[in-house]
Image (cartoon, rainbow, N blue to C red):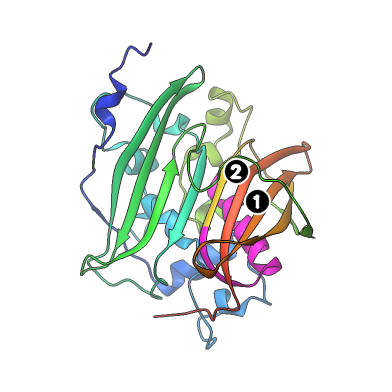
Amino acid sequence: MSQFDLARAVGHESKPSPVAWTKRDLLLYALGIGAKKDELEYVYELDERFVAFPTYPVVLMLKGASSDVTDFSKMVGSDRAPGLPEFDPNRAIHGGMSIEILKPLPLQSGEGWTLSKKIIGVTENKSGIIVDAELMLRDPKGTPFQSRLLDSTLEPKLLAGASPKLSRLDRKPRTRQRTASRIMCGDYNPLHIDPSIGKRTGFGGVILHGLSSYGFAARAVLKSVPGELKAFGVRFTSPVRPGDTLETSIWEMGPGPDGTTEVAFVQKNLATGKIALGAGVAYIRKGAPKSKL
């Protein structure tokens, strides 16, 4: 039995935080997740098809409205929910991430956009406390744009469920991971650059942030199954280090909700032989044109 009253945290809502982005932020994010010159719609602002890569909103909780370097500890640890113990933000590990895309993102925000957070579940196991939270991105009029479910530590209970039965392999794109992607993706957690913190937290050195692998996987999925991404979720199952090569295996599963196609995927770290992203699932509206505002 926990020494903390974890149930008190469930339902806790943080004060909405201001968020903002520019075309430059979208370009840096696309480069940070490995977008290449044949993906001009993500890396060239004058391309008539230029759009935000659909998973960009996952970095807004780390970026906020700042156009400068942010203090990671303050960004993720400033709002302590009742019933939860004090914790070191530098030791927090993503267990999973899912995004549901309600509307296409404008190319630049302007003022008035907010990100709200509500804790929807808290559990404890031998490895730590698992906090499940829902984050909602809203425009200045309060219109929801993206709904996210975030598991901040170990075991997600999100869009990504149990590993699916796999029927047909579509593609195995590979990519190498690098530390510079943390900056392009707006993640200033020192765990991803400072070896001493990685050693202190039991990882033996620097590990790369999961949101980078997340973006690489999303690109691989959309290259294999082109269309409009409506939802995307994963479990983060093992760490990735600088220079590791990742292989994403993708399977088209069949019809999904609301006219989408369900796609299953896993991402394997070829350096360790372990699955880095597991229980991946995406819902894609095939053939739908990419939108921009």
Residues at marks 2 and 1 touching, judged by CB atoms closer than 8 Å: yes
Pointer 2: what residue? 208
Which residue type carries mark 2?
Answer: Leu
In the drawing, does residue 12 fall left or right of residue 76? left
Residue 248: image location, x then y, percent: 72, 53
Residue 203 visible from this viewpoint = yes
The picture places residue 252, in percent across and down from the top left corner, at 70, 60
Identify whether 135 is placed above or below 108.
above
For this orientation, the residue located farthest to the bottom is 48
Q: Which residue is mark 1?
A: 178
Location of the N terminus (image quadrant):
top left
Q: Which residues are magenta?
A: 208-231
Q: How many marks?
A: 2
Amino acid tagged 1: Arg
Q: Residue 103: where, in percent of width, then height?
A: 39, 70
Residue 133 on the magenta segment: no
- At x 64%, y 44%, the residue is 277
Q: Residue at 47% across / 33% down in the picture?
A: 153
Q: Is residue 221 magenta?
A: yes
Q: Is residue 34 visible?
A: no
Left or right of 268 in this view: 152: left
Which of the 4 image quadrants contains residue 30? bottom right
Crowd rating for badge 1 (residues with CA inside 10 Å; few <14, some 14–19, many 20+): many
Rendering coords of residue 135 (x, y %) = 34, 50
Q: Nearer the viewer, residue 252 or 193?
A: 252
